[in-house]
Image (cartoon, rainbow, N blue to C red):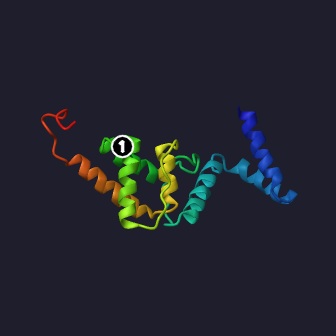
Amino acid sequence: MKSRTISRFMLVIASSDLTDAELRELEKWLQNTPHVLSRQVKALREQAGRLASPSGEHDPEDNTSNNPDRDPLVERLDQLLRREAGLNATRAADLLAERIHEEYRDLSIPSLGKESFQRWLRLLLEEVPATSLLHFATQIRNSAVHAPMSDWPLKAR
């Protein structure tokens, strides 16, 4: 495992345009400052994340850069609609689509189809502002959570 890590590091260095003098300077720096490399790399990654983020903020504990399928906003929307409101994916998608159509009449909303619910949410985020989606999801969640409960739930059927 360690040799693979070192090999990958060496390939990165080899693909750079560092001169021999710069490589010697890097080698000397590594010898004289142990355990600094990982901290320096982490700091550079955080800075790059802040520059890439539209808001300019980056959570160092957030690992979404390591997993592109994990999006905190999508996870929050999923939590509001499915876990907190207790809706299945189809019902949550239908209700959210209805709310979007009320606000954005001309917008073409993709159907859930065979997509995963979170993938569908990511597609929506390309068309609808995140703040609007959060607002709609919160409204749906609040309606579901605060709806009066029947003493006879089967009677409604």
Residue plotted at (73% across, 47% down): 31
Foreground pick, 46 / 122: 122
Residue plotted at (57% across, 51% down): 65
Residue plotted at (48% across, 50% down): 111
Task: Kindly tell me whether residue 61 is visible in this rendering.
Answer: no
Task: Kindly tell me whether residue 139 is visible in this rendering.
Answer: yes
Q: Is residue 69 left or right of residue 129?
A: right
Foreground pick, 27 / 102: 102
**Picture coordinates of residue 145, whole percent (x, y):** 23, 46
- Mark 1 crowd level (few <14, some 14–19, many ≥20, 10 Å Cα): many
Amino acid identity at mark 1: Arg
Residue for badge 1? 82
Foreground pick, 72 / 108: 108
Q: Quadrant of the C terminus?
A: top left
Question: Furthest residue to the right?
Answer: 20
**Picture coordinates of residue 136, whole percent (x, y):** 34, 58
**Picture coordinates of residue 32, whole percent (x, y):** 70, 50
Q: Quadrant of the N terminus?
A: top right
Question: Furthest residue to the front?
Answer: 157
Q: Is residue 11 left or right of residue 155?
A: right
Q: Is residue 156 left or right of residue 68?
A: left
Q: Is residue 83 left or right of residue 35?
A: left
- Where, by quadrant of the figure, is residue 89 drawn? top left
Residue plotted at (53% across, 48% down): 63
Question: Relative to 82, is 3 above or below?
Answer: above
* Secondary structure type for disc 1: helix
